[in-house]
Structures are given as C-alpha cells and as structure tokens.
C-alpha cells in the first residue's frame, strides 16, 4: 500500500511538473510571437510612412509641373493678346488719321461751296441792281433830252467810264505794287502747282511670278511624294506655289517681292539641276537668300549713286534696293524712284531750291513700298515713319508723307514730289493700261460732253487726249461756246482721272447751202 501511495504521489508530482513545463514553454512562445508581431507592426508603420512621403513628393512634383504648364500656356496667350491689341490699336490709329483727313477735306469743300454760293448770290444781286440803274438812267435821259435808246446808251457808258476811270487807275497801281512784293514767291508756288496738275497715278501691284517647266512631268517632281517637296519649298521661301492646269508653268504667289524672287530663282535652279528633295531645296534656298541680300544692297547703292544721293543710312539703302523687285503697272518702282529724283532735281533747280535735297526726297518717296506688306498703312506714311526713325530731316519726312496728299504739305518740296511722281507715272510708255480702262475713259469723256445743253455730238480722239464737241448754232452763240468749253474742262477735271492733259475743242458751224438752176 505504501508503495502504491508513493507511486501515486510520484505520478501526481510528475504530472504537475509536466504541466508546469508546458505552461512555461507556451508562455515563452507567446512572448516570442508578441515580439514578432510588434516588429511587424513597426516595419509596416515605417513602410507606410515612407510610401506616404514618396506620394507627397510625387504629388508636389506633379502640382509644380501642372503650374509651370499653366503659366507657360497663359504667357503664350497673353503675348498673343498683346500682339493682337497692338495691331488693332495701330489699325485704329490709321483709321482715325484717314477719317480726320476726310473730315478736313469735307469741311474745306463745304466752306468753299458756301463761299461760291455767297459770291454767286452777290453777283446776281449786283447784276439786278445794275440793270435797274441802267434802265432808270435810260428812262431819265430819254425823258430829259429826248434821245434815242442808242444815243442814251452811249451817253450812259461814257459817264460810267469817266466815273470809274480814276478808281481803276488806283486799283491797278495797288495791284502792281502788291505783285512786285510777292512776285517771286507767288511765281514759285504757281509754277509748282501747275506742274502738279499733270496727273494722278493708279497702282496695281503684281503678286505672282511664273516659272516655265520643260515638260508636264516636272510638276509631279516638284510636288514630290505626298507633297513633301512643295511643302518644303513653301516653308523655306514663305510663298505659295500654285500648280494648276496651266501647261508647262508653275505660278509663285506672295506679297513679299524679294521672297517671291528667291523662290523663283531657287525653283529654276532645282529644275535645271534635277535633284529635287527637301534637303536640296533648303540648301538651294539658303544660298539664294544670301545672294539676294548682296543683290539688294548693290542695287540700293547703284540707285543712290544714279540719283546723286550721298551719306544715306545703310539700312535705308538696303530698303531702296528691295524696290528693284517691286512693280506698279509693269513699271519698276526702283527705276521710277530714280526718275522721280531726276525730275525733282531739275524742277528744284528751275525754282531756285536745293537740287540735292530734292533728289534725296525723290529717291526715298516710295521707300514705304518695301515694307507695306509687313506694316499696316499706306506706303507714304510707312516710308515717312521709316525715314524719321533713321534721322532724316523733317522736310524729307513731310515730303514723303505728303506726296499722295495724305498729310498737308509743309514745303514746296512736298508739292514737287507729288508732281514728279505723277509725271513719271503718267509719261508715255511708263505704265501699261488695259484696253477696258482705256475704252471706259473715252466713253466717259463723250458722256461728260454730251451732258451739256446745246451739244449735238462729241468725239474723243487722239487716244483720249482731246474731245471735240459739235454744238447746235441756233442754241449756242460764240460767247456761249467759250463758256461751254470751260465748263466741260472743269467737269472733266472733277470727274475723271487721267494722265497728262485733255484738250476740249468746241465747234460751232453754220452752213448755208443754195443751188443754182
């Protein structure tokens, strides 16, 4: 029994020890798992924090990039708007200037018409009063002296002649003295104004050039695969290449005459060479652009030498050289400028002005045509602004701006510039004129003459330089024929624009025919 009890006690003690051992072992395992769990949580928190920081940095970078793109886009839009506003402001200024000039001319015309109406009313009133006085004098003389009407008329005329003789003599003396004081100044002004009345010019600029092709197949080579050659040529030269149904020809269109000339020379070189591809096109165009700069400079220097102009700014000389490739009604603008300089020099010498200054104005008067495809406004105003920027004298600037009467003339040089420009443009052979315009002018001449009462027929002859008017002799006497010729010429001046002058000849003829039997 005792042995059994000891065995039982030993078993209980063994069980207790095993349980205690297992409990200690489980406790250590739990603590190890808990430590691992805390380590995992710490690592996870650290990774999460790193990911959050990386996300924040990436978000900030994207925000900065978006802000830069927005600012760049906004800046580009702002620059476009500013450029557009500047162009609009410049156009508004040009329009305001033109409106002001038109208003000024309208006011001057209204004042002139009002003055003419007042003078006409005064003349009619004086004529009526004079007729009344003459009638009263005739009646008095007939009643008192018993004279006939013819005798009374002679007596009255003699009396009036005696009364006004002294006043007429004094008036003539005053006019002679005044004429002596202002003779030279008025003579210069009248001469310049008379020269100016030659003609007004009309300009139609050529915007295209034509390049001949050896055959129709060359058009396809110029166009290239999917149009790459023609696109490269247009991009390099800045002009439009028109390939239409015109046989064996290509048309080059563009506002800039220098670019158009470069494109023409480059295209002719490419066609002659036969190698037509984008790289070759860029190479040929670049070489001709450099060559063109030298040609323009040399043409400007030759023009300045021919016109006798010295010490001009090199940039102005280059602008003048560009006019070599500008035409107006088939008239070369550079040659026209040299011709105007010569005319102004001759007229200035006759009027005792400075021929050198006059030639300078003549050479530069159309310099604005070198820029009128790039700058808004008329070529006269553009040229005056350009000359002012390069330090030309106020007399030169005003003469160039006023040679088409867009601004008031401040010197005789401005009037001479307008006159020489008109003479050079309208001289025979200077410009070509279409038959349609020519026929319309002849028809308008005859229509103006036929619009007057008493005219039976009219004929425009000598290429529109003369109009002969036949009148009905029973309605128009010799004195009325002289008045009619003047009225027709005034109406032609007011309604027609023409080169040179037009002669008006009024013919009054009475034929008496009888037959002897």
Image (cartoon, rainbow, N blue to C red):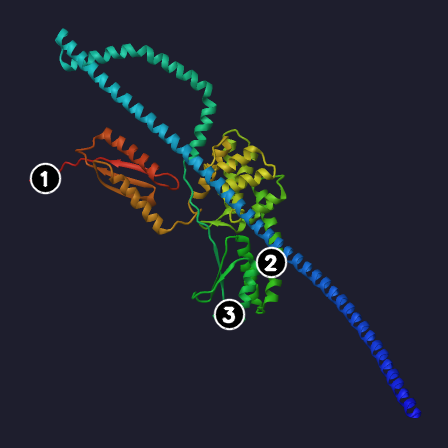
Residue 192: x and y in percent read 45, 31
Q: Can you see residue 397?
A: yes
Q: Residue at x 56, y 38 (%)?
A: 360
Q: How crowded is mark 3: few (under 14 residues within 10 Å), some or many (20 or more)?
A: some
Q: Which residue is drawn at 51% across and 33% down?
A: 413
Q: Find numbered disc 3 in the image and state the secondary structure of the residue it sits on.
A: helix
- Which label sits on residue 515? 1
Mark 2 to mark 3 CA distance (whole Å): 21 Å
| Callout 3 touching callout 1 (CB < 8 Å) | no
Q: Nearer the viewer, residue 226 or 166?
A: 226
Instruction: Name which of mark 3 and mark 1 comes first in the sequence.
Output: 3
Q: Can you see residue 334?
A: no
Residue receiving disc 3: 218
Instruction: Name which of mark 2 and mark 3 comes first in the sequence.
Output: 3
The answer to whether 204 is drawn above or below residue 112 in the figure is: below
Residue receiving disc 2: 288
Q: In this view, does 479 lie to the left or right of 430?
A: left
Q: Which of marks 2 and 1 is in front?
A: 2
């Amino acid at each position: 029994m005792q042995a059994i009890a000891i065995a039982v006690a030993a078993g209980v003690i063994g069980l207790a020890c095993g349980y205690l051992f297992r409990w200690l072992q489980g406790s250590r395992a739990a603590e190890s798992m808990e430590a691992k769990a805390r380590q995992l949580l710490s690592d996870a928190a650290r990774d999460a924090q790193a990911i959050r920081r990386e996300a924040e940095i990436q978000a900030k970078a994207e925000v900065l990039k978006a802000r830069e793109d927005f600012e760049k886009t906004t800046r580009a839009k702002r620059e476009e708007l500013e450029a557009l506003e500047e162009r609009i402001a410049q156009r508004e200024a040009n329009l305001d200037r033109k409106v002001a000039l038109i208003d000024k001319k309208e006011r001057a015309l209204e004042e002139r018409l009002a003055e003419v109406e007042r003078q006409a009313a005064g003349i009619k009133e004086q004529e009526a009063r004079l007729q009344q006085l003459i009638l009263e004098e005739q009646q008095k003389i007939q009643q008192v002296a018993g004279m006939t009407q013819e005798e009374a008329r002679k007596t009255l005329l003699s009396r009036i002649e005696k009364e006004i003789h002294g006043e007429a003599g004094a008036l003539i003396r005053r006019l002679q003295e005044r004429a002596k004081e202002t003779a030279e100044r008025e003579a210069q002004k009248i001469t310049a104004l008379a020269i100016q009345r030659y003609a007004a010019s009309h300009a139609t600029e050529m915007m295209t050039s034509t390049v001949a092709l050896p055959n129709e197949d060359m058009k396809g080579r110029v166009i290239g695969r999917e149009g790459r050659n023609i696109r490269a040529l247009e991009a390099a030269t800045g002009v439009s290449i028109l390939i239409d149904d015109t046989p064996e020809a290509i048309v080059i269109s563009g506002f800039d005459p220098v670019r158009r000339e470069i494109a023409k020379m480059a295209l002719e070189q490419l066609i002659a060479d036969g190698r037509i591809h984008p790289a070759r096109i860029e190479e040929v165009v670049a070489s001709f652009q450099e060559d063109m700069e030298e040609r323009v400079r040399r043409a400007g220097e030759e023009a300045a030498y021919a016109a006798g102009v010295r010490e001009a700014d090199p940039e102005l000389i280059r602008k003048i050289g560009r006019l070599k490739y500008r035409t107006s009604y088939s008239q070369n603008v550079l040659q026209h400028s040299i011709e105007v300089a010569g005319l102004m020099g001759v007229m200035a010498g006759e009027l005792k002005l400075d021929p050198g200054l006059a030639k300078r104005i003549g050479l530069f008067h159309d310099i604005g045509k070198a820029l009128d495809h790039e700058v808004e406004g008329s070529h006269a105003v553009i040229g005056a602004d350009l000359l002012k920027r390069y330090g030309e004298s106020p007399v030169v600037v005003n003469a160039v701006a006023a040679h088409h009467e867009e601004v008031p003339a401040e010197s005789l040089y401005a009037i001479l510039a307008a006159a020489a420009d008109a003479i050079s443009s309208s001289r025979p052979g200077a410009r070509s004129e279409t038959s349609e315009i020519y026929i319309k002018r002849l028809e308008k001449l005859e229509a103006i003459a036929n619009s007057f009462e008493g005219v039976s027929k009219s004929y425009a002859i000598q290429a529109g330089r003369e109009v002969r008017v036949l009148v009905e002799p029973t309605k128009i006497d010799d004195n009325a024929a002289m008045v009619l010729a003047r009225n027709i010429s005034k109406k032609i001046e007011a309604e027609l624009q023409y080169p040179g002058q037009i002669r008006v000849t009024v013919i009054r003829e009475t034929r008496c025919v009888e037959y002897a039997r």
